[in-house]
Amino acid sequence: MEATLEHHKITYPTGATKWILILTAISCAILELIDTTVVNVSLREISGSIGATTTEIAWVVTAYAISNVIIIPLTSMLSDLFGRKTYFTASVIIFTFSSLMCGLSTNLWMLVFWRFVQGIGGGGLLSTAQSIIVGAFPPEKISTANAIFGMGIILGPTFGPALGGFITDNFSWHWIFFVNIPIGIVATILAWTYVTDREGAEKPRKIDWWGILFLVLSVGCIQFVLEEGTSKDWFESSEITICSIVAITSLIAFIYRELSIDYPAVNIRLYKNYNLAMGSFMNFMLGVLLFGTVFIFPLFAQISLGWTATQTGAFMIPSALCTGISMPIVGKLLGSGKNPKTIILIGIIITFAFLMIMSFASPDSSQNDFYFPFVLRGVGLAFMMSPILSLAVTGLRGKEMAQAIGLANMIRQLGGAVGIALINVFLTHKNAEVRGSMLGYVTDYSSASTDRIAAITQNFVSKGYDAETAKALAYKMMEGIVYKQQALVSYDQGFFMVGMSIVICIPIVFLIRYKKTVAPAKPIADH
């Protein structure tokens, strides 16, 4: 059964076909996003298994992130070149096969190579999945489509650490990749059966090879700098300096190239659309918030509060479920004509409240203290996510819609990388600053610290240690106490800084242009 919008002669899927199509697309998007974070909690086990150092094993994450962010803006062009059905199905197959090879990898560089390939398949899934979901709804239902896709964006990175921790603790790290295989096989069959080519799609007359090359160099180098900058001490490293120069030069060349030819690989002229430009900034901040909080909380919980990886990951699931419950509510509010600016502002305020509460955590904080803040996080992200996704594509159709979706997803992923890099830099400096302040109080002239060390020493003596060993153990224990305290203060201030950065979005929201249409069913612009 097909429903037809006569004005555009576009057919929309209905009934079971529509929901199987949407379920296939959203499952693939979630799968892709889970794999951005699933390995993070397993890196220690992987490095021990394949004999890699802590620095080297970071490439398992970096390789996926770089290929992912390179391919995302090219998905619209590749989708038109090969046909959306063929390209999406091929992306599922590449993702699934590379997952198998990741699990079978026996050394570091084999694993890094297959993670890079997995990122190419995964990046193709993310933006194409969004364009499939958006394309399954008429223009007036775009809020519903983006609410569905938004759930995937939240659920993926949140479930990743929980799933990774559970699998690593109970099976082995290989299974964090093998678990993709049965889902990938089912998704391949469903994609080939139900995904259709985009209506009105035309194969590119020429392929913009120079544009693709400049994009790969610029985005790839930017992602590398953001991922590796902290560990390589930023511009003290010649690698980071060279990559930064290449990134800037290639970005300028890419922009010039795409604006000067009539067959660009990525249509950046779309940024003439005022709301798309505003939406992109908001998307960037959304990436900072989404990936930044997923990055900082596990460190905070495991280092300062002593939680296990599984415990940390599982705790974040209720927050994602709150988002899942809130998304349809937000979709209905937008669908009924509520001003999206108001909804985004509510989301910013709720998310800011979450970050402020987290910034007051203490050594005595327990799980019970974090349930309510994480409910706020889930609801706040839902109120921000759906209107921002809609904002980035409102009024666009067909090829332009697909291009805008690719750009929006790339910018959000880059926002996440920038957020994590900045939080890492902030925490490194803050740790050193707080440690310096704290050690000033742990001296032979401080009665509080000498009394504490004496009590700990006496405790070790009572357990049978000699006086010298007991004193050495007491100092070691005191060092551990100081480290936990300094980490706690640093993470608290980290949450506070992310909260302050979200406040920057408020003036941007007021700059968004919103005009309530009398007949929402009528498209805003006809391309």
Image: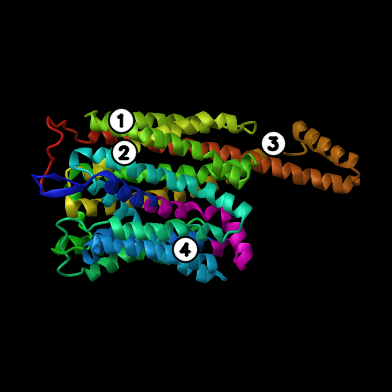
Above or below: residue 264 compared with residue 502: below
Above or below: residue 299 compared with residue 199: above
Distance in Å between CA atoms under marks 3 and 4: 51 Å
Dot 3 crowding, Cα within 10 Å, few <14, some 14–19, many 20+: few
Of badges 2 and 3, nearer the viewer stands 2
Secondary structure found at label 3: loop
List the residue tagged with mark 1.
343
Asked whether disc 1 touches disc 4, contact meaning CB atoms under 8 Å apart, the reply is no
Q: Between disc 1 and disc 2, whose residue precedes?
A: 1
Of badges 1 and 4, nearer the viewer stands 4
Q: Amino acid at mark 2?
A: Ser
Question: Taking 100 as reference, is 134 left or right?
Answer: left
List the residue tagged with mark 4.
99
Secondary structure found at label 1: helix
Marking on residue 441: 3
Q: Amino acid at mark 4?
A: Ser
Which span is picked out in magenta? 28-57
Secondary structure found at label 2: helix
Q: Amino acid at mark 1?
A: Ile
Asked whether disc 1 touches disc 2, contact meaning CB atoms under 8 Å apart, the reply is yes
Q: Between disc 4 and disc 2, whose residue precedes?
A: 4
Q: Amino acid at mark 3?
A: Tyr
Distance in Å between CA atoms under marks 1 and 2: 9 Å
Q: Residue at x 34, y 28 (%)?
A: 346
**Farthest residue toward the left?**
7
Q: Between disc 3 and disc 4, whose residue precedes?
A: 4
Distance in Å between CA atoms under marks 4 and 2: 30 Å
